Image (cartoon, rainbow, N blue to C red):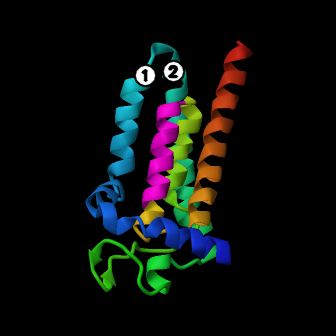
């Protein structure tokens, strides 16, 4: 972790007390999924059906890669587990810290994966909000979120490209 990572973390985490209810709501484990369903429903057009399977695959692959492969290899502790005076869910002085490791953020990866596969500006906003919420709530370093966005977005865009190429060969 760099000094810049900690400085950015402290800046964004400092926003937590001002809108605690909002960050807690956005940081809920199901929040990205609910936001993604709403964004897909708002954005959905029949021509997007061909990209639904790549979107689901991108999320599944990014989730497994994050949780089962990269996090155990990176072994990076969450900021709420290693820093004093972190604003997080739970009572003051006793933050609720997520289970497992920090690097990369699965929330950021999964939301970016679906945004990339569907090329959805609305879902890109969801991915952005989910990532910022993870930092504001003390669960991730900013670089964890950036790594998640890169992994998930890359998978989503790559699978979309593969489907587009496969359909053009018919």
Q: Residues within 10 Å of mark 1 (few under 14, many from 20)?
A: few
User: Which image quarter is the C terminus in?
Assistant: top right
The reply to whether the magenta stretch includes residue 130 is: yes
Residue depicted at x 62% and y 71%: 5
Residue 73 seen: no
Q: Is 111 rendered above or below residue 157? A: below
Prevailing secondary structure class for the magenta stretch in the rendered image: helix
- Taking depth in this image into account, of 10 and 160 the one nearest to the observer is 10
The reply to whether the magenta stretch includes residue 70 is: no
Q: Which residue is mark 1?
A: 44
User: Which image quarter is the N terminus in?
Assistant: bottom right
SS under mark 2: helix
Per the rendered image, the range of residues in magenta is 120-133
Residue depicted at x 37% and y 66%: 16
* Residue 69 percent location from the top left of the image: 60, 65
Q: Is 163 rendered above or below residue 68? A: above
SS under mark 1: loop
Q: Residues within 10 Å of mark 2 (few under 14, many from 20)?
A: few
Circles 2 and 1, Cβ within 8 Å, touching? The answer is yes
* Residue 94 percent location from the top left of the image: 30, 84
Residue depicted at x 44% and y 87%: 84
Residue 29 seen: yes
For residue 48, the mark is: 2
Q: Is 166 rendered above or below residue 125? A: above
Separation of disc 2 and disc 1 at Cα? 7 Å
């Amino acid at each position: 972790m760099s000094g810049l990572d900690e400085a950015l973390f402290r800046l964004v985490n400092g926003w937590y007390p001002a809108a605690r209810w909002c960050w807690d709501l956005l940081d809920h484990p199901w929040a990205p999924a609910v936001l993604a369903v709403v964004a897909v429903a708002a954005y959905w057009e029949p021509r997007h059906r061909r990209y639904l399977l790549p979107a689901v695959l991108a999320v599944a692959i990014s989730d497994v890669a994050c949780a089962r492969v990269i996090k155990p290899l990176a072994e990076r502790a969450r900021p709420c587990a290693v820093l004093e005076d972190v604003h997080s869910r739970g009572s003051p002085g006793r933050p609720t810290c997520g289970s497992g490791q920090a690097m990369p953020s699965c929330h950021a990866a999964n939301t970016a994966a679906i945004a990339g596969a569907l090329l959805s500006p609305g879902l890109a906003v969801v991915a952005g909000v989910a990532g910022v919420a993870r930092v504001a709530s003390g669960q991730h370093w900013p670089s964890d979120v950036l790594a998640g966005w890169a992994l998930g977005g890359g998978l989503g865009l790559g699978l979309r490209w593969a489907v587009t190429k496969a359909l053009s060969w018919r």
